[in-house]
């Protein structure tokens, strides 16, 4: 007989697992708090879009509020590493203890040099590894120049050109032989040998599946289930983007081991599992704007099943066909996702632009007031002067009034100080 949970209880379990169930702690955010948040999430997705902020910075703001982004940069460059880059859900910062397991199960052949002539690929790889072994971390462009490659745009097949170098770099990155030492200001990877990023990691498993691959999958699914708190096999597999069939086998073993418990959730018509360490808080009291790449919203079917929230990223949708905007963040209030807002940081003008704001059906009466407060906090974190709301969307008029009231309140407090 499976334990039975209401949909609201399942939501609270999911929010608690992601660190989104409680009001943020007061006072300055410490490096320890950032590190603990990352340990809880296991990964944060990387994306090059910077219309608001780089995507890997936003999950920590959602959970901790106004924090120093330099903490993440130090975590990614510290020895020993607290976080490193690799493929997971997508390109991500991951916990280093997941690296060896992920190398065995990630297959991103479309980004690498798998289609290149093997002899050519081996030759380029050998030279790349020699250069990285002998010197400092380098970008793809720097390595291209060092190796003396010239792009031949008339050439239809792979040759000694920039594209070959970049593809080989991605191939070696996928195999786990090289890693990202850091990123440039323009967000280019600086590549180095993985042994320099993780000195104790040993040799990377390589492209083939090793004998302990099943144990590696068990660890990944257990971590994904911890991060979810509750979910389906598909939810857990999607977290690190591992094969569904292998994930299902691991779920079965974790149930037998007592790490996962089958549960019945009202309204969720799939087999659902709760992690043994997942907590069920009495109430959810948090407020947060969620990145389009936040781990709470990774799996869209789970998001809709749990919260009744249909969500798609419309960055690549032609503007006339967008429903809600270019860079739309869901707004979490207590135990519901109650609104969505299209945001842009106009850094030159010092403005946080809310270009559209839409309320969800049944949004509580204080949605606009709470969202205005969250936008004000985000503006402070991004070092922007004020929030400007465009008259687009059904929530926009109330949000504009609430932002104006919030701004007046902040000004009054500053005058008193």
Image: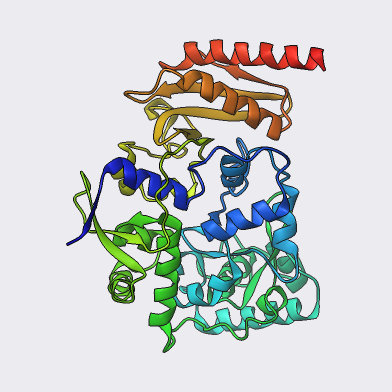
The vertical placement of 279 against 198, above or below, is above
**Image x and y of residue 2, in percent:** 20, 60
Q: Is residue 73 left or right of residue 405?
A: right
**Image x and y of residue 347, in percent:** 71, 29
Q: Is residue 43 visible?
A: no
The vertical placement of 191 against 311, above or below, is below
The vertical placement of 341 against 8, above or below, is above
Question: Looking at the image, which residue is at 63% across and 46% down?
Answer: 57
User: Number of marks in the image?
Assistant: 0
Question: Looking at the image, which residue is at 75% across and 80% down?
Answer: 133
**Residue reaching furthest to the bottom:** 211
Q: Is residue 52 visible?
A: yes
Q: Quadrant of the C terminus?
A: top right
* Colour mapping: rainbow
Nearest the camera: 235 or 63?
Answer: 63
Q: Quadrant of the N terminus?
A: bottom left
Question: Looking at the image, which residue is at 41% across and 81% down?
Answer: 215
Nearest the camera: 360 or 279?
Answer: 279
Q: Is residue 394 left or right of residue 102?
A: left
Q: Where is residue 173, by image quadrant? A: bottom right
**Residue reaching furthest to the front:** 282
Q: Where is residue 28, by image quadrant? A: top right
**Image x and y of residue 350, in percent:** 72, 24
Q: Where is residue 68, by image quadrant? A: top right
**Image x and y of residue 3, in percent:** 23, 56
């Amino acid at each position: 007989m499976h334990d039975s949970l209401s949909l609201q209880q399942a939501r609270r379990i999911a929010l608690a697992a992601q660190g989104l169930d409680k009001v943020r702690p007061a006072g300055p955010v410490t490096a320890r708090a950032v590190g603990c948040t990352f340990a809880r999430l296991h990964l944060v997705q990387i994306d090059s879009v910077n219309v608001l902020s780089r995507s890997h910075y936003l999950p920590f703001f959602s959970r901790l509020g106004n924090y120093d982004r330099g903490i993440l940069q130090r975590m990614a460059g510290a020895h020993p590493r607290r976080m490193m880059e690799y493929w997971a859900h997508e390109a991500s910062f991951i916990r280093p203890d997941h690296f060896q397991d992920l190398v065995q199960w990630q297959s991103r052949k479309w980004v690498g040099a798998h289609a290149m002539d093997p002899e050519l690929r081996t030759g380029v790889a050998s030279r790349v590894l020699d250069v990285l072994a002998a010197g400092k971390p380098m970008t793809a462009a720097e390595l291209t120049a060092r190796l003396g490659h010239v792009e031949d745009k008339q050439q239809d097949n792979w040759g000694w050109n920039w594209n070959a170098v970049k593809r080989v770099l991605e191939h070696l990155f996928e195999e786990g032989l090289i890693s990202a030492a850091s990123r440039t200001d323009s967000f280019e990877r600086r590549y180095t040998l993985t042994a320099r990023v993780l000195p104790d990691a040993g040799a990377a498993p390589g492209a083939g599946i090793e004998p302990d691959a099943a144990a590696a999958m068990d660890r990944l699914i257990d971590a994904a289930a911890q991060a979810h708190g509750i979910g389906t096999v598909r939810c857990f597999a999607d977290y690190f983007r591992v094969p569904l069939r292998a994930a299902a086998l691991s779920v079965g073993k974790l149930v037998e081991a007592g790490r996962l418990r089958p549960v019945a959730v009202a309204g969720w018509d799939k087999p659902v599992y709760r992690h043994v360490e997942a907590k069920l808080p009495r109430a959810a009291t948090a407020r947060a704007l969620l990145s389009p790449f936040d781990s709470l919203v990774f799996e869209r079917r789970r998001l809709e099943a749990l919260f009744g929230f249909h969500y798609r990223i419309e960055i690549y949708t032609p503007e006339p066909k967008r429903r809600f905007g270019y860079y739309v963040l869901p707004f979490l209030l207590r135990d519901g996702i109650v609104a969505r807002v299209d945001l842009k940081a106009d850094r030159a003008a010092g403005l946080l632009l809310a270009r559209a704001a839409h309320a969800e059906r049944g949004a509580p009466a204080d949605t606009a007031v709470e969202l205005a407060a969250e936008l004000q906090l985000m503006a402070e974190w991004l070092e922007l002067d004020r929030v400007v709301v465009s008259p687009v969307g059904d929530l926009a008029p109330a949000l504009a009034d609430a932002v104006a009231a919030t701004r007046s309140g902040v000004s009054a407090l500053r005058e008193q100080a």
